[in-house]
Image (cartoon, rainbow, N blue to C red):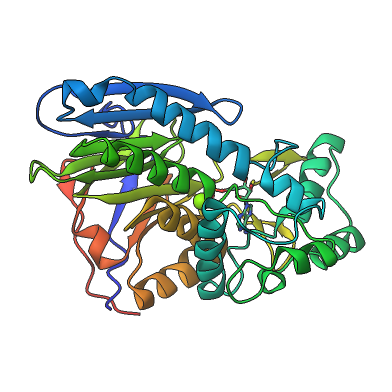
Amino acid sequence: MRLGVLTRLVAAGLALAATPAGAVAGGAEPVRLEFVKMGGIPVRVSAWDVAPANAEGLGGACDARLDELEGKLSAHRTDSLVARISRGELRTVEDPDLAAVLGKAATVARRTGGAFDVTVAPLVDLWRKARIDGAAPNAEAIDAARSRVGYRLLGVDGLDVGRLADAGGALDLGGIAKGYMADAVLAVLRDRGVRRAIVEIGGDTAMYNETGGAAFRVGIRHPLRRDRLLGVIEVNGGAVVTSGNYERGFEIAGRRHGHVIDPRSGVPTPQDLLSVTVAAADGSEADAWATGLFVLGAEEGSRLAAGLGIEALFVVPGPDECLRILGTSGIIGRLQLHEGRTAEPAASSP
Ligand code: AMP
Ligand code: MG
């Protein structure tokens, strides 16, 4: 697959149209639902063509499914499956949701050479403590945490949690769980006869459209300017997910660090890449790839994405306070930057 990169410079200070983040679609007014989950993450649902008989109980069903998944996948809930595995209390995965997440995570871990790795938890913990202490960890502490990290500990299918526990490892599904939860809410809506829907969880957007109506227009947030959009991407279904350090980065001794950690080096990813947006067939895949490509960086990440047919858009700082936007050809064709122009794939190849 050709890599259409080096598309356009966008002035970082440009006043972009104030379309709300998330997505809009044509047609009659949707049923809208809103929840707050995982200690403060907003979940927004829009469902179109909902028969009155199906509307009743729709919110309750979505809410219950989200709570169920949070109870299984959250690293912060002491009673979750993930927490029990991390304490070595559960040695096999019987739960279908956890098995599905770990299976998808294993595929992306393998394909990114371990840049995406749900066993990154000891390093996440180490850097969380560093943030509280205000001092970066030393090399020994990083090495000690790294020795307990590695996607191979989970075996080829990603399910060998007993072996992970024996190695003193732990799970952190923060890089994939939101996408999986968005998929799960869509499944609830589908089961109830909803024919077109969109779910947004903390910026991860997943959707489907069985009506043949207008495509969804999903806003891509400007990585440096909250409440502004860089542009809009048109999709008929699947998911659009962005990973970036801009939301949850932190500072230690005057140096900024991101919340995404490179498991290979044990340190947070450098700040030269601002964000990665991935469009994929479903939320968990898009979520995992966005995090994995973010770790790999614009150069290596765009090469890998182009080679595997992953649709990805990388935003890096450009000259004169501009942003440089690099994308694989599939995503560029569906992208409208908010300068009023559509990006063109460049003639360059890998
Ligand atoms: P996201 O916002 O989807 O990019 O996910 C970031 C979250 O994933 C972090 O807050 C951690 O919980 C977790 N995480 C950090 N580094 C990695 C990594 N290299 N691979 C997988 N998950 C990670
Ligand atoms: Mg992610």
Q: Position of residue 12 (x, y in %)?
A: 38, 40
Figure check: 180 above or below 348: above
Residue drawn at x 30%, y 27% is 20
Residue placed most toward the observer, 80 or 219: 80
Figure check: 302 above or below 76: below
Residue drawn at x 51%, y 70% is 107
Q: Is residue 35 left or right of residue 331?
A: right
Residue placed most toward the observer, 266 or 316: 266
Residue placed most toward the observer, 200 or 139: 200
Quadrant containing the C terminus in the rendered view: bottom left
Q: Position of residue 277 (x, y in %)?
A: 39, 52
| Any part of residue 342 in sight | yes
Figure check: 23 above or below 316: above
Quadrant containing the N terminus in the rendered view: bottom left
Q: Is residue 5 left or right of residue 195?
A: right
Q: Is residue 191 left or right of residue 291?
A: left
Residue drawn at x 61%, y 50% is 173
Q: How many marks?
A: 0
| Any part of residue 253 in sight | no
Q: Is residue 210 left or right of residue 90?
A: left
Residue drawn at x 63%, y 66% is 159
Quadrant in the picture for residue 282: bottom left
Figure check: 322 above or below 59: below
Q: Position of residue 88 (x, y in %)?
A: 82, 55
The single residue placed furthest to the right in the displayed view is: 140
